[in-house]
Amino acid sequence: MRKNILLVTLCYLIGAWVPVVAAGQAIPRIQFEKYTLPNGLEVILHEDHSTPIVAVDTWYHVGSGDEQVGRTGFAHLFEHIMFMGSQHVPVGAFDQLLESAGGNNNGSTTEDRTNYYETLPSNALPLALWLDSDRMGFLLPTMDLAKVNLQRDVVKNERRQRVDNVPYGRADETILAALYPKNHPYSWPVIGSMADLSAASLTDVQNFFKTYYAPNNATLAIAGDFDPAATKKLVAEYFGGIPRGPVIERRTTVPPVVIPHDEFLVLEDRVQLPRLFYTWHSVKDFAKDDAALDILAQIIANDKNSRLYKKLVYDLQVAQDVEAYQDGGRLDGKFQIDVTPKPGQKVADIDRLVQAEISNVIRNGVTTRELQRAQNSYKASFLNRLASVLGKAERLNYYNYIVGNPDYVQQDAARYENVTARDVQRVAKTYLGRPKIVLTVVPQGKREMMLTASGGGQ
Amino acid sequence: MVTSLRPKPGPPRSYRFPSFSDEVLPNGIRLVTSPVSKLPLATVLVLVDAGSTSDPRGKEGVAALTAAALLEGSQRLDGAELAEEFEKLGTSLESGADWDSAFFKITVLSDKLNLATALLGEAISRPLFPEREIERLKAERLAEILQLETEPRGLADEKFSEFLYADESRYSQPDEGSAKSVGSLTRADVDQFYRANYNSGTTTVVVAGDIPADATREMVTEAFRSWPSGVPRRQPLLAKARATERSALIVDKPEAPQSELRVGHIGLPRKHPDFFPTLVLNAVFGGLFGSRINLNLREVHGYTYGASSYYDWRRGPGPFVISTAVESQVTAPALREILLEVERIRSEPVLAEELSLAKEYLEGVFPIRYETTAAIASALATLSIYDLPAEYYDSYRRNIHNVSATDVLEAARAHLHPDELQTVIVGDAQVVRDSLTGLPLGQLTIHKS
């Protein structure tokens, strides 16, 4: 993420997003038109004239998973550099022009892809398209080491702010390194390491751009209030002349993940309370068991009536919080449960309760009521993502990228509706029955608090 | 062909904030209804004049605890059952208390709106306040306070409020209360606070979404049929500065890789005649990505991932804060730049480009903010909380548009006070301390952790 989110949160809205469920209500389709320019750029258009605003969302099909060992964090560093101006856009002008048009913009990088997006009044659509085309077509002529160095410093500060100076902030990278073999593309964090960020050179930047930032490796989604004929003309005018890049060979397989037995890790951190992180290797996004694992996570921990929340937080009051999630990417995935004990509670006692509840699900399955609640909650999240034009542009790009069809929201929702209680029990047994990585983050100097095979956690 | 000719925005399509009705029901509740039929959804937002500034002295945190405890069960349903009933309707009830009000919110499919509103009414008008759950909520808050000690960003915000306001000001303490005050709260305190502050005279219900304009009156009357009548009783708010001259505090976090910085002073109440010039002033100064503070600290110097400033708008004068996190070694130069920027924006008019950037941004993002029913309901709530006129949103962009460079300079001179700047640094005192010598931050205090 390139911008501190504080900067764009200008108006204070009360509370957060509330989930909405369509009991008996179908998820609407997102009507769209998709076409490809001769240079390979995919374009997806969706009209919604309810508010005079438009979202422009460009996905480049490259992420930290495409990086090399020794150059981690590069895809994200590059994301920052994309805002530093291009041949016809002086340094600083990108944001200035968009802000003065009344638009919000940002970008983000994951293991699998990098996106750049703007939401702006519909009359400013040509400006956004022009700016995006200039950085796609003309980034390198004005690229220099000074720009790279400046954003390198900004990114190092981003790492400090989001990882190093945040309680439990280094847990993720510790887990990834333990779960995945060294040459696995998900074994390093998206933000990268400080040493690798220091090593990135101007030549790396140039080569990365030439390899991955060609129109044939990008998809441009436009959603909102615009005239399709005029917009197609503008897209052709601004993007049509950008030359096609080389054919990109992206990885389609990953090295096998082998966890022969439970592995117990400890990380000392500036924290007050220990936190337990259980991680199992699971499956990638859209794999056969992906939706059932999502539902399992919801039933185990993610609402007031979920198993672990009810037991640990409500009934026994031994935990401060608990969460669970299935995290599937394009190539691979993991399932994780995190628990923070209340002050004075031992992690070994918490562990016994967590294990008992997992065994209970494996042995006895889940109830229809639990299943329906979880399915309701997924249905709600599908609708919520369609409430804004940017949300819709993101969905179109996501489905286009993962399954090759932008209009896949109904099929995606159906995956969750079709999960049965038996599926949930089966995936619990299959995946949570596997050996796992167990990380305890402990206050500094308190390694004895860690969970071990024999219990531990003093 | 990519052209080097940058396109200029065409004429904007007209936009109007959704229309709404505003009335007082026979039972005394204020009802605001906005029919918006984009998706088959509606948001109900109940506001009660029972925010943290209503906390009795020594009972800080009771407003937040009460708002949370109302979700823990009604006389008919316990907390889990209540949550499940909302889940069956495809929604969940969210609650909280900020400085100025307590709020309760659901977003639901419009055909479930009546049932969901009735359930919401039941939850907040016939509460159970189970002792056990109140104790659990207290314990969770106390653990949160404990965890804050190692969460530099949140800690800096909290220490800054404490450093800014005199002890006797409610704003000097966290809105959800301190370890001491929360520890002392009892079920009786919650019950008493509820009885004193929750009634028809303190309640506004906002309904926004796919509903006929005239359908809400009966629905809300019915849902709140057992709501007691009453009158608002706002206590006078004290918001006094702790110090009138510059001073600084280091909260020592040995080996912290970054310094969290907060610099500022007491700002303005939300309902102030200079609101619009001050909004534009802050946009130029630190409210946007392209603002002076961020460009200087991030894009010119690379000191930080982001720097911003904001007026924390409340009924009373909330803080004006410049906020950033920088690598420990550059703490002093970053602070120097901040001090210079405060002086600079008071010494000469902002440039025409800066002014138009800020104004065009604020005017342009206006419709983007109101895409969802929840956002529209929150915007309408703002009118009620701060007692703003009905035409506030219709005249918003015109009011921004009319702000001149002179207005901004006058606002800067009137509402930025360089002599009163207070600085809080959460970071490694050993690394930071000596580098501050020569910086005019005023008297320096160090808190060892």
Image: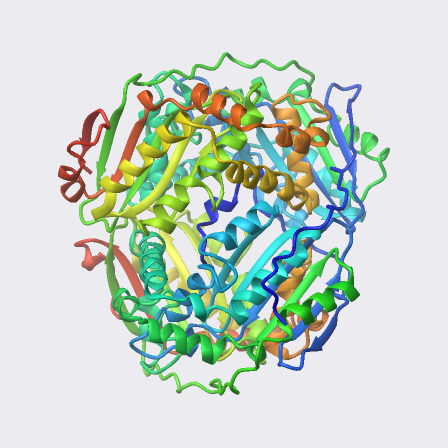
Render colour scheme: rainbow
Name the residue at 40% across, 60% down.
Answer: A338
Find residue B41 and report its horizontal and vertical position in percent. 75, 48
Q: Is residue A95 rendered to the left or right of residue B231?
A: left
Name the quadrant of the C terminus of chain B.
top left
The picture places residue A446, in percent across and down from the top left corner, at 19, 55
**Which of the two residues, B292 or A372, is positioned nearer the viewer here?**
B292
Question: Image check: B86 left or right of B15?
Answer: left
Q: How many marks?
A: 0
In the rendered image, the vertical position of residue B182 relative to residue A21, given as above or below:
above
Against B295, residue A378 (above or below) is below
The x, y position of residue A119, in whole percent, is 62, 53
Quarter of the image where one finds residue A134: bottom right
* Residue A146, quarter of the rendered image: bottom left
Q: Picture quarter containing residue A200?
A: bottom left
Q: Nearer the viewer, residue B159 or A112?
A: A112
**Where residue B244 appears, x then y in whole percent?**
31, 16
Q: Quadrant of the N terminus of chain B?
A: bottom right
Vertical comparison of B55 with B11: above or below: above
Q: Is residue B276 visible in the rendered structure shown here?
A: yes
Question: What residue is drawn where x is 52% and y is 20%?
Answer: B192
Say which residue appears at 57% left-offset and 30% top-offset.
B102
Q: Nearer the viewer, residue A373 or A71?
A: A71
Q: Is residue A371 visible?
A: no
Q: Is residue B47 left or right of residue B168?
A: right
